[in-house]
Image (cartoon, rainbow, N blue to C red):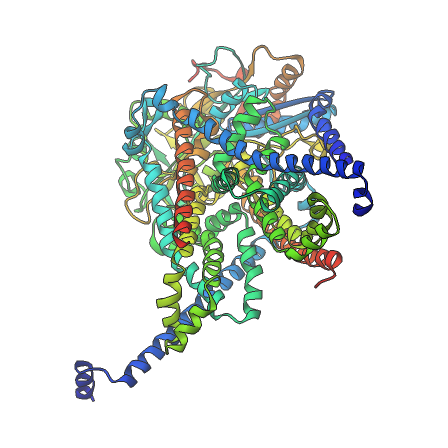
Amino acid sequence: MHKTALGAALLLAGVLAAPSLALADTSLSAAGSTALLPLVKEAAAQYQQAHGDVKIAVAGGGSGTGINQVAAKAVDIGNSDILAKDHPELVDHRVAVVGFAVIVNSSAGVKNLTKKQLQDIFSGKVTNWKDVGGSAGKITTINRPRNSGTRAVFTKTIMGDVAISAEGLTEDATGSVVSTVGTTPGSISYAAFSGTRNKPGIAELAIDGVTPTDGNVVTGKYPLWSYEHMYTNGPSNAATSRFIAFVTSNRSTVHKLGYILVRDMKVSETDR
Amino acid sequence: MALAQNIGKAGAARAHRHEFVAKMILRSAAGFVIVAIAALIAYLASEGTKLFTHDHVSPLTFLFSPNFNPDAGAPGSLVFIVGSLAITLFAIVVGGPFGIAVGIFMSELAPRRVVDAMKPAIEVLVGIPSIVYGWLGLTLLVPFIRNATGSNGFGLLAAGIVLSVMILPTIITLSEDALRVQPIALREGSLALGATRWQTIWRVLLPAAASGLSVAVILGIARAIGETMAVQLVIGNAGVLPKGLLSATAALPTEIVMDMSGAQQGSLLEHALFSMALLLLLIAMALILAVRIALRKRT
Amino acid sequence: MGDVTITRARGARTAADRVRLRRFVDRLATSLLWSSAIAVLLILAFFVGYIFYLGAGTLSWQFLVSPPSEVTAGGGIGPEIYNSFYILVLTLFFTVPVATAAGIYLEEYAEPGLFRTIVQFSAESLATVPSIVMGLFGLLIFVYLLGWKFSAIGGALTLTLLNLPALMRVTQEAIAGVPATYREASMALGATKWQTIVRAVLPSAIGPLTTGIVLIAGRIFGETAALIYTAGVSVSAGKAAYDLNPFRSAETLAVHVWYTHAESVVPDVARIGNGSALVLLLMVLIFNVTARLLGRFLTIRFTGKA
């Protein structure tokens, strides 16, 4: 019995001592915005190939999650579509710009909606596609949860003071919004270009006649876009800085995944 | 070897010491369970009441206001409470009688070999992870309801059906046990008086096993009300009171899993979510008390 | 004929009628009970068949060993499978000693009284705590309070709390099934209580105990809600995904199904979900079969009884 107890104690000690050993490698973690997720994931994969001693774990969760977790030091980098207003200790790194498209299930039969029509649909005033020039059919709105930066950008840019109706569905993140819109007839939602490009079953809508393209975002004609932020808790250390710089360094990857470099923007805007 | 050791006073003393140490270790393991639940209650009670003590929200507002908009200072959670109760009720109304029927079958009708075949099947039903039930609901049930009714498929009905299946193993196993422990004499007496098998079950066995059966139902409720993943995938997560079986709504656990990760520490939203968790814990403990009361009646 | 029926219905029913009605009801009930049992088996068979149908196309060696992808199609579930087993082993490492010890105490030592009642009540309460609530508890204790971030060990300890009561129960039942004569014989030979438990009681209870542990292991393998906020939703890249460090974030297979649907932007969500669901189901089946075979083998080995 003594031997077993000793063995168990040793094992426990080993388990508890492990984190100090793990520090020998550089490990980074990031979580947050699912609009920014594809870029960070892809950059992390490329970065780790080039630097074998660095380990990077990247997760989604939503912008609110990213800000929360970096503020609680649960991760090194918090990704967000929106500013972390309540956290003066967090340091902002703008890494890209991303546009957001209003998307509908292909069955809706509309190509363009005005800002007013979008307000009517998401506030629950208009409930049938035929009232906004589509084919007759019930409208199902799909929203993102409260912590979503995408929702915050949509609310600020499109809804203004009009409240989003609680009717309709809520989906966790960019990915599930896009796949649910693709499979649910009559549904409408909004998601980052990085998630909506080339997805089956959906159509991206023009807003007030302006199509959701990178070109229209760069010139400021298309209204629905936002800066993407990577937050660190306090000034970032060398390893984190190098990775954040790497995220924005590869123009072709940034473009391929549906983002725009901050320096390419012809307009600037105060953050939302 | 035990004998050899125990011969002689030194050996006896050592054995006695071992005995004492062993007993203390075992006792502290049992005590750990008390510590665990006490810590859980203390933590949830402190986090879950901040909504009332720190944000000065009335518990009545939390429980009975359908307006959940924490950013605007409104933490009313009626929608989630009603959603949880509705899907749990649905699950019990559909899955309860069904499960009890199977329990009766296994205890009273089934030949030995059929029982032996069904036991592992029910174990598998228990073992299927709830996320897989949810995945089936999402890929099979939601499109089916959508095509059959013209709604978008998500909602109370989908969540209720998924839960009805998920509580079956609990109800089957416990109701079978409740019936099986009834004395043979009860059955023989009834049959000897000329009752049919069904009359024996209906008039004699079911009333005799009532407390055990109610335990089965209560634990089925406990299983249903806390279920998170399977429900979250199919209920639609709409923050509105359900208007009917087909409307999308939300439940306490699904709201917690949706919004907790993004809730700022110390915010009204976080406090409200912890209050919901506390409410779930209180419901769970109340159900356990109900089980205790039901079982005490039996003796 | 109509007249006859009406007269009969109005008048007192004959004894023969009543017997016939009772027999009919009895037969009806019997067939309903049989069909409800068959329905359960059909539901299960349908589930299993449907999951196989959905996932069979995805299941390949490549899928089982590849790392997941967050953006492009073609991701696998290799690290997730590893993490599921890793967290399972860690969880059992903590759960089994504590739960069996507590179970032995309650069954062999504890006198009926306040302590015993409180332990039982605590265990029952712990068993009904919804797993999402336990997950939040783990989030506060392990992630925030102890500062472990999202970690395999935080997830495992949360699952330990969740499964402790079930394993205690299994232990109690296994020990209760050992005939009193074994204990009496051992004590009569001069063995102490502890020696009796270790050398007589546990070996004869080892069969059912193992069956119970493996069945619970199957449930731990599929747990989701308690892990999202404790073990996290990400895996390390490359070889680091397979290391033994318990303080790294460890997304399990069950969590991956949720995460892929909810959070990721890969185009082949359905393929990954279907494949993972099939792997989870296969694991449940394997755990169930193993539980029975191992339990039977150990019973024969340690007691010589079939």
Look at the image and tell me in which quarter the C terminus of chain B lies: bottom left
Left or right? Give the position of C210 relative to C266. Answer: right
Residue C241: percent from left, percent from top: 69, 33
Left or right? Give the position of B194 relative to A16. Answer: left
**Does residue C272 appear in the picture of this structure?**
no
Nearest the viewer among B278 and C61 is: B278
Residue A122: percent from left, percent from top: 32, 33
Q: Looking at the image, how many numbered discs can be counted on the residues?
A: 0
Nearest the viewer among C138 and C50 is: C138
Q: In which image quadrant can residue C237 be found?
A: top right
Residue B278: percent from left, percent from top: 41, 32
**Does residue A187 appear in the picture of this structure?**
yes
Nearest the viewer among B40 and B161 is: B40
Q: Kindly identify the residue that appears in the image at 43 percent across and 19 percent down.
A: B266
Q: In which image quadrant can residue C166 be found?
A: top right
Q: In which image quadrant can residue B238 be found?
A: top left
Nearest the viewer among C5 and A217 is: C5
Identity of the residue furthest to the front in this view: B9
Q: Kindly identify the residue that appears in the image at 58 percent across and 56 percent down.
A: C52
Please tell me whether residue C152 is drawn above or below residue B117 in the rendered image: above
Please tell me whether residue C10 is drawn above or below residue A151 in the rendered image: below
Residue C125: percent from left, percent from top: 47, 40
